[in-house]
Amino acid sequence: MRVLILGPQGSGKGTQAKRIAAAHGMPHVATGDILRAAVADGSELGLRVAPILERGDLVPDDLMVDLIRERLAVEDGFVLDGFPRTVPQAEALDSMLEEIEKPLDVVLLLEVSDEVALERLVQRGAIEHRADDEPDAIRTRLRHYHALTEPVVERYRAAGMLVAVDGEQGVDEVGADIERALGAVGARR
Ligand code: AMP
């Protein structure tokens, strides 16, 4: 199964993506994790993207597309988390999956208000000390989400691929809604 999970920062996307991956034995492909690992390694990629991540800005599309192309080419099923974040990234994803004849089965959207997202991110910042969970970077990231990623959501909604889930529920309730959505996909395949 090929699953894309969308939602603003603080929607619980990473948590739910990990649960889906574990429950279905599929890899969790999270571009934020890949980039943070590159920063921690001090690789060429890491050095280039570190200041971008710290500000809460977006890494250039061409770099992200190359990164994800390499990764998805070797996977049959996956939960994709953090990509695509812009319409050009979504177009690149759709055409690369079409090329290898492995289209997405479903696109999940975790819906939360900005207030809830902000509150959760501030809490996470206090616990995990992520450089980009600091107020200025959080505001920048949510601004990018509304301006650049919401059009991606609308693209998949128009294609009839989107299943929206109320992300303001507890972790288990959101997980149950997601499993119901995935069950429906499984039944269709
Ligand atoms: P995340 O963990 O998904 O919130 O990603 C952390 C940071 O990595 C983001 O704030 C961006 O700076 C960068 N990033 C992750 N995925 C992408 C993407 N698809 N396009 C551009 N930048 C990204």
Image: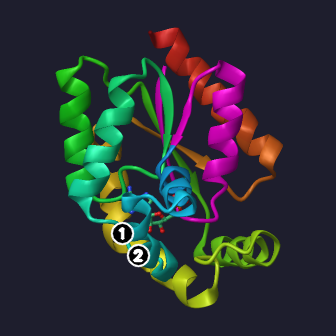
Image spot of residue 32 (x, y percent): 51, 56
Residue placed under numbered mark 2 in the picture: 52
Residue 76 drawn at (x, y percent): 42, 17
Q: Secondary structure under badge 2?
A: helix
At horizontal 34% and vertical 66% (from top left) the residue drawn is 59
* Residue 155 showing in the rendered view: no
Mark 1 to mark 2 CA distance (whole Å): 8 Å
Q: Element under label 1? A: helix
Task: Name the image colouring.
Answer: rainbow
Q: Nearer the viewer, residue 27 or 149?
A: 27
- Residue depicted at 44% across the width and 63% down the height: 46
- Look at the picture and state if 115 lies above or below 188: below
Residue 15 shown in magenta = yes
Task: Answer with the quarter of the image where residue 145 lies.
Answer: bottom left
Residue 36 bears which disc, if any?
A: none
The answer to whether residue 27 is above or below residue 185 is below
**Image: magenta residue range:** 1-29
Query: Could you tell me residue 16's position as x and y percent?
Result: 67, 43
Please state, as top left, top right, bottom left or bottom right, where the C terminus lies in the image. top left
Label 2, ligand 1: CB separation under 8 Å: yes
Q: Is mark 1 within 8 Å of ligand 1?
A: no
As for residue 134 lying within the magenta part, the answer is no
Q: Nearer the viewer, mark 1 or mark 2?
A: 1
Q: Which residue is at the front of the view, 27 or 114? A: 27
> Picture coordinates of residue 64 (x, y %)?
31, 53
User: Which amino acid type is marked by label 1?
Assistant: Arg
Looking at the rendered structure, the kind of residue marked 2 is Ile
Name the residue carrying label 1. 48
Mark 1–mark 2 CB contact (< 8 Å) = yes
